[in-house]
Image: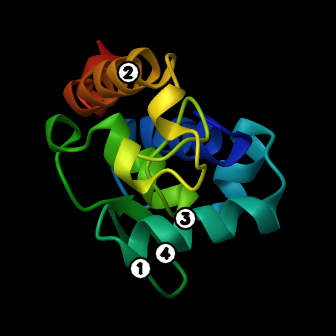
Amino acid sequence: MLITRASEYAILSLIVLSKAQSPVDSETLSNQLMIPKSFLAKILQTLAKKDILKSYKGVNGGFALLLEPKNINMLQIISCVEGKAPAVFDCAASIQDCPSDRAQMCYIWPFLNKLQGRIDSFLAELTLKDLLE
């Protein structure tokens, strides 16, 4: 599940919005990025509800970044759009939380857990500003 189409569209939209001098409406973004407007509108509204974007109403309305690109990281974007933190594997966060009665015999969990931690750290360190450079 790491990066779905919704996450991809959110990141692409944020890149365009970070370069814009004024708010950009969802139709313009949809056309520019060739993303279905209704799907994009939902993504943009989600980002606005999570205080990553500011939504402006009216004739000159649209969306603009609420935060500086250096203050928006990929983990934040993906978690916002997906409704949960990105996961490389579908497994419990700890051996104790594992629904299987064979958790103590799982030899791959420590590796997968370490991998997930590294990916989370990488995504938390990678900012929108990094993608613009």
Q: Crowding at label 2, few (<14), some or many (≥20) Cα neighbours within 10 Å?
A: few
For label 4, the residue is 60
Spatial CA distance of label 2 from label 4 is 52 Å
Q: Crowding at label 1, few (<14), some or many (≥20) Cα neighbours within 10 Å?
A: some
- Type of amino acid at the residue the image marks with label 1: Tyr
For mark 3, give the secondary structure: helix
Spatial CA distance of label 4 from label 3 is 16 Å
- Type of amino acid at the residue the image marks with label 3: Leu
Evaluate if marks 1 and 4 touch, with contact meaning CB atoms under 8 Å apart: yes
Q: Nearest the camera: 74 or 89?
A: 89
For label 3, the residue is 44
Which residue is found at the position 69% from the left and 59% from the top?
40
Seen in the picture, residue 62 relative to 98 is either above or below; the reply is below
Q: Quadrant of the N terminus?
A: top right
Evaluate if marks 4 and 3 touch, with contact meaning CB atoms under 8 Å apart: no
Viewer-side label of 1, 4: 1
Q: How far from the left and from the top, in percent, is residue 111?
A: 41, 14
84 relative position to 131: left or right: right
For mark 4, give the secondary structure: loop
Viewer-side label of 4, 3: 3
Mark with earlier residue (1, 3): 3
33 relative position to 43: left or right: right
Spatial CA distance of label 2 from label 1 is 46 Å
Spatial CA distance of label 1 from label 4 is 8 Å
For label 1, the residue is 56
Spatial CA distance of label 3 from label 2 is 36 Å
Evaluate if marks 2 and 1 touch, with contact meaning CB atoms under 8 Å apart: no
- Type of amino acid at the residue the image marks with label 2: Pro
Mark with earlier residue (2, 4): 4
- Type of amino acid at the residue the image marks with label 4: Asn
Which residue is found at the position 33% from the left and 19% from the top?
114
For label 2, the residue is 110
